[in-house]
Amino acid sequence: MVTAALGLCACSPIVRDANFVGARDQVADVTLEGPFDGQVVDATTAEPIQGATVVGVWSYDQGDGLLGPAGSETVEVKTDQAGRYRLPKAKLRQRGVAVRLVAFELVAYKRGYVAYRSDAVMEGGARADFSLRQNKVALRKWRESDSHADHLLFMAAPPEIQQLAKWERDQANLDLYRSLGGDAAPAPTTPAPASEDGLDAPAMELLDATALLPPDEVRKRTGYAEAFEVKELGDLARTHFYHGVHLQAVGRDETYDVAYRVWKSPPGGLDGVRETFEATLPGVAPTGEITDTTWVYDSEDVRAVAFLDPEQEVGLLLTCGAQQCVDIESAIILAKFAADRLESIAFEEAPREATPAVVPVTAPGVGGTP
Amino acid sequence: MIVRARVRRRFHRYVRRSLGRYLSASVLIGTALLGRPASAWDPSTTHVAMTQRAVLQSQLHVRWMDQSGLTRGVFSAIRLHPDDLDPQLRRMLTVALRRVHEASGAAPLGGPGACPGASAPPSTQARCVDGDVWELDALGWLKLGVALETAPRTRLLHHFASATDPAAATWADPELPAAVLRAKARRAEGALARAANRSAFSGGATSAVGWLSDAEDPWAPPATVDHLRQASLAPDARTRDRELALGLLGLGALLHVVQDQSVPAHARGDLTAFFAPLSPTRGDRGLPLQEYARALYGRVTLPGTLSLSPRDTQRSAPLAPTLHQHLLGYGEYQGLTRFAATNFWSESSLPAPKALDTSLSATDAAAALIGEGAGLAEAELDGAELSPWPAPQGYLRSGTGRGLAAFDTDEEGRIRLFLDRRVYRDQAAHLIPAGIEASASVLDLLFPAFPDTTVDFEAGIIDIDLREGLHAPVLTVLVEDETGLRTPLQRIALRAGERNHIVDAFQTPLPENRRLLLSLEGATAPEHGLSLATSFEPVPPAAAMTVPTAATAEPAAAPAESNVPGASSGAPGTLPSTTTDGVGTQGPSQGELIAPFPAKRTAAPKADAAGN
């Protein structure tokens, strides 16, 4: 469980278990200490990327009971001509008693590409493919639709990478401002940062579940005669694996609305979706109503049906207002209809939004103007 | 209290006697998955992720961008000169910087020694900014403040609430010294034990609520609010940057304390829970819930429940007008501390084991086991049942179906409650979003929107709508030159709850290379509100800036004339005239300068200076 519990009085820290594997496709020892090696390549062409910055960070905690961070050790290297990197074993310096080596994170950065973190992917979720040895860092080229705000938030960059990514800050401010609904006047567009080989970046795809349950099909099954407006559920961001669709009853309150959320092949599988369903619908035991794992929830205001389809790697949560679905059976009928049409889930190209130009910071250090 | 004491003794005896089962059943969940203990929520993963999510959920970034003419947001770099800090703050910050995890985005560039000189190899310059200066984006300073709250770790002692009175300024866990600290003191491990040895730690300290008013702690809200005010009002850019950085550090510390109130062990004053063994290694102890959350969710995938209501229910105003009310409740908002304390059990505040008659119904058995309620709200306990029942093990479910605790049967045949993976998962799914919501609201409270304002650059008139917003508002009109030096022109006490029309607010036209800035100070509530300042840079119409009309080319009347930057006899940053009750009285009296909002005028008529 604890790979190297060397004792609190010893000079070396306790080393926690690693959350990655030793090597790809083979059994190998794994430890947070390292050493680490791998190759950085272009995700599209598989060509090695020379000169990418790779930073390894070992993190320590200290204390007994009430615990806190106890610092990091960092190593920075550049990839060679073959795109290879190698990070040495952690020094495991003495840092006092009750110290634990608790994490190792690797961050790779090359301008023109989306950065890489060993513990996360930029699209959301944890990374599951990092390995101690022979790790493959496939960097995706920067797309016009990518957000510098998402990029900086994802990187949570150690200082060495911050230095390289400084240029993204102003654009990130604007990207985040726009995504949060800021209404400043749009500015002229600027080209995205060019990839160094000049190849066009592929467009980003978004999951499209609007065909799963069209308004006409809802009306047919619930007897509702009036119009729906098809919108997006805004609480979770639409991605290549999630789409939330909101059929908003025009001129009516939300008890006439229907909404459904669809996850298709999410990173990390359906376990996270299952946990979300269980937390959202507490106390509801899964049944075999639609698939082998179906949750049915009925309350005064809203009916909800959720199911997982492991074969098609789909999770769906349908909610239906009590005025639209007069009983839980109506909601189950809608969910069954959707379950029979999972093949209609598609992908569409993300709209290429106009990227505002960087607004020059005319007054550096305007402290307090926030 | 006696019951609770008994429970705690049982808890520790239980831990000691049945470590193997305990490890496999519940406590080692996190270690089994990934393995790392944490304090409260883990500062480098869960807290950082909650803080980041709160920033995105709040209006902070949009307000900063709107109020700065799109020049400042959460990714903007803020510099801090070590020489500008007093020794105590510098020492505290240096300690925090040594401890922060660099892969959390909270470690700044630069700092003393980061720029070794031009002859040094380029690789040693990787962190250099400019001399000894630290540089980090605003979000990074906020995250660093979160980490700072653990340096030293004794700071974590003011993250607890009193189990008996959440509003109390102190808390105590009287069983802890007897049960745990004696052993810790013998081994003298860690800051807490050292503190215990030196100060005869009594098992309690200032509570989170008490800390909110702590005027001595440089990272507590009183100092933080002052830094944030100075970040608006200080004369030079370097000072404003310093104050903003310090304010964000304090704000990060505040968010850490607030988020910890979403941990039942914190909200129920249960320090004992933090000493559960996380592995067989001696001294490897922590809070199982935090370990579980860190291991399962990491820094990027926080849990949450989905809204079954499809329509947007986004909060448009802070949950409460004071920090205390964010923890203790305001109107329909229950308060984070009360929510966590009355809806969730912590590890060692569970009801004691009991022998139950198997002929009891599931709900009667649950009621008998819970006894007097063990501090949970009626809404949770009403309809609670053991499921399945009768059975040697299962779950105690609330009336709404939530798993409040797991149960099994002990060696003496009694039904014993404990928290397992499923219960932790349910707790995390409700508590982490609640902590984020409260954090986002605190950010919105401390960075209020600047009221709707119209500035007539040709006439020197400001119309400001105060029908909502700060109490006892005072407006400072400033100009900033090209070096970033701000000079206040006048301070004007405004009328809250109505529109204010201010004439001769500044000289027209503004001298070249001068920018107009407005800073509004006021309290978030009539009583116990935070005294805040928010700034706004109105953008002049391009035409007014470049082609002054005949009407505006004339210098304004005498009061404004003396407001020309540089004309003041006072030092930069001081008001050019004497003040009374903190309000400048330059030129016409305040009664003349302020009037209820009349029809908007487009010129600055001297004759209308009274605003009538």
Image (tube, coloured by chain):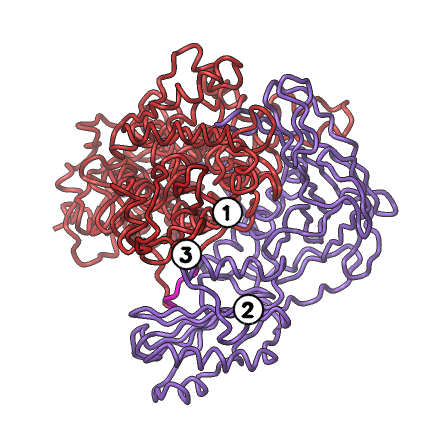
Chain colours: A purple, B red
Q: Local crowd at mark 1 within 10 Å, few (<14), some, or many (≥20)? A: some
Q: Callout 2, which amino acid?
A: Leu
Q: Position of residue B489 (x, y in %)?
A: 30, 35
Mark closer to the observer (3, 1): 3
Chain name for mark 3: B
Q: Callout 3, which amino acid?
A: Pro
Q: Position of residue B321 (x, y in %)?
A: 26, 43
The residue under label 2 is: A308
Mark closer to the observer (2, 1): 1
The residue under label 3 is: B388
Q: Is residue B25 magenta?
A: no
State the SS at label 1.
helix
Tell which of A96 and B475 is nearer to you: A96
In the image, residue A274 sits, relative to residue B69, either above or below, namely: below
In the image, residue B352 sits, relative to residue A326, either above or below, namely: above
Tell which of B471 and A266 is nearer to you: A266
State the SS at label 2.
strand
State the SS at label 3.
loop
- Residue at (50, 18) in percent of width and height: B91
Magenta segment, which residues? B306-310
The N terminus of chain A, quarter of image: top right
Mark number, residue A9? none
